[in-house]
Image (cartoon, rainbow, N blue to C red):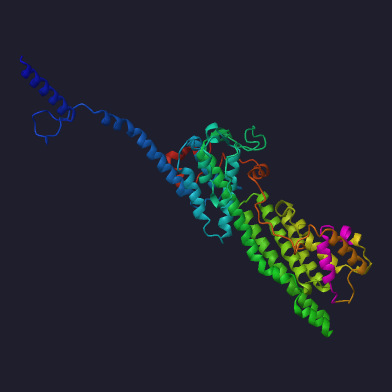
Amino acid sequence: MTANNKFLSVRSKSSIQRSSDSGHIAGTDAKTPPETNSVITPRESSEVEEKPQKSLNEKQQENQDLLIRCIAQHLGFTGSRPIAACIIYKCLLQWRSFEVERTSVFDRIIQTIGHAIETQENNDILAYWLSNASTLLLLLQRTLKASGAAGMAPQRRRSSSATLFGRMTQSFRGAPQGVNMSLINGGLIGGADTMRQVEAKYPALLFKQQLTAYVEKIYGMIRDNLKKEISPLLGLCIQAPRTSRASLVKGSSRSNANSAAQQALIAHWQGIVKSLGNFLSTLKVNHVPPFLVRKVFTQIFSFINVQLFNSLLLRRECCSFSNGEYVKAGLAELEHWCYKATDEYAGSAWDELKHIRQAIGFLVIHQKPKKTLDEISHDLCPVLSIQQLYRISTMYWDDKYGTHSVSSDVISNMRVLMTEDSNNAVSNSFLLDDDSSIPFSVDDISKSMEQIDISDVEPPPLIRENAGFMFLLPRVE
């Protein structure tokens, strides 16, 4: 074969190979479809292998969609256990979502909660989600531990992701104290639901942070809603109605006028008591942990203390003997409410009123001129500062019996002590500040809540018959 023929032969063979690679035979029409018995290309082989995985991913996505649709509904409670929190936890554990590097399910759950609490004035909805979010947070606290990889997550990534509500911590602190212990004080009971430690990846730890922020946010919303509701009434509770003073001046129908004034003032206090009772009922119906309920009312009573005490020291007309009697009667209404609510829910709320209680005690005590500074500052009003005692002593006036305040010697001694403390004194230092911080941590919630048995929590109808959620059904022994 000549060199030229060899070149043509090689060229012809090469052309056939290239044509066959593209599914055609050399010398045929380009529009002719490839034969059915052509060899499967590597790309086609890869697509065939991906189909089972794609089908699996689609199934997982469908299950996530169904879970989100489910928890968007009001699922209620099994006993005192919020169903939504239990279902979410079981699904995340079953799907091993805590252990994956990337997943959208956490974001979707957070978005569902965020959408549900957009109606900030609906305390029933807020209480429902406070119950669910705190319970779910408790389960996460007792389950998750930071893995090495998660703990080494880039600082920049943490900072940009963990800014929800401006209160989220800027770095992960790993597993909280007690998380790695065998959960003697609490756990899940029954079969596959037995509590076990899971090495959490970054998305799961971020989810826990976001959930913590929501617990804090919802708690604050409920507390602030109650503050808004009682604030107008507090303004009416600090000063006795004018009819009382008018009757004292005229000296006519004194007992009838005082009785009417007393009833009018007590009506305002009873309005506050009614609001407290309504909020307590809402929190109890939604099984908000008693620990959080106590925190709400402790802060509310602290708020009442600040508002009444500051008003008393800023308005001389409030520092009268008769006004002290009226406020004392109102405080008795709050004390009775605390007694009825029991320590389980009221906690130390009554103790938060110590400033206003001691100030009112000073207003109504008899024989003030005979009291020494030591008796006043240590026995009668131990929590009040010298500035506060001086203020109330100099503003006091007796509109009922015409008696005097403390002696001039006591006033002089107060001035001396105030001068000695002048380096630390500031303007209006006698006023109290309202504390609106969040008075608990995740560890506090975990330590205060009892163990939770989620083994017998029935799944809601929407997913009960779905084969993908059979693991939610209670196990039959």
* x then y, percent, for residue 171: 57, 41
Q: Is residue 161 left or right of residue 318?
A: left
* x then y, percent, for residue 179: 62, 36
* x then y, percent, for residue 213: 57, 49
* x then y, percent, for residue 38: 18, 27
Name the residue nearer the viewer: 274 or 215: 215
Q: Is residue 72 left or right of residue 34?
A: right
**Magenta region: which residues?**
376-399
**Main secondary structure found in the magenta portion:** helix
The answer to if 97 sits in the magenta stretch is: no
Q: Residue furthest right?
A: 370
Quarter of the image where one finds residue 446? top right
The answer to if 386 sits in the magenta stretch is: yes
Q: Is residue 322 left or right of residue 167?
A: right
Quadrant the N terminus occupies: top left
Instruction: Name the residue: 41% across, 39% down.
Output: 60
Q: Is residue 270 left or right of residue 149?
A: right
User: With respect to residue 190, does 299 lie above or below?
Assistant: below
Instruction: Name the residue: 50% across, 44% down.
Output: 459
User: With respect to residue 371, does 42 lie above or below?
Assistant: above
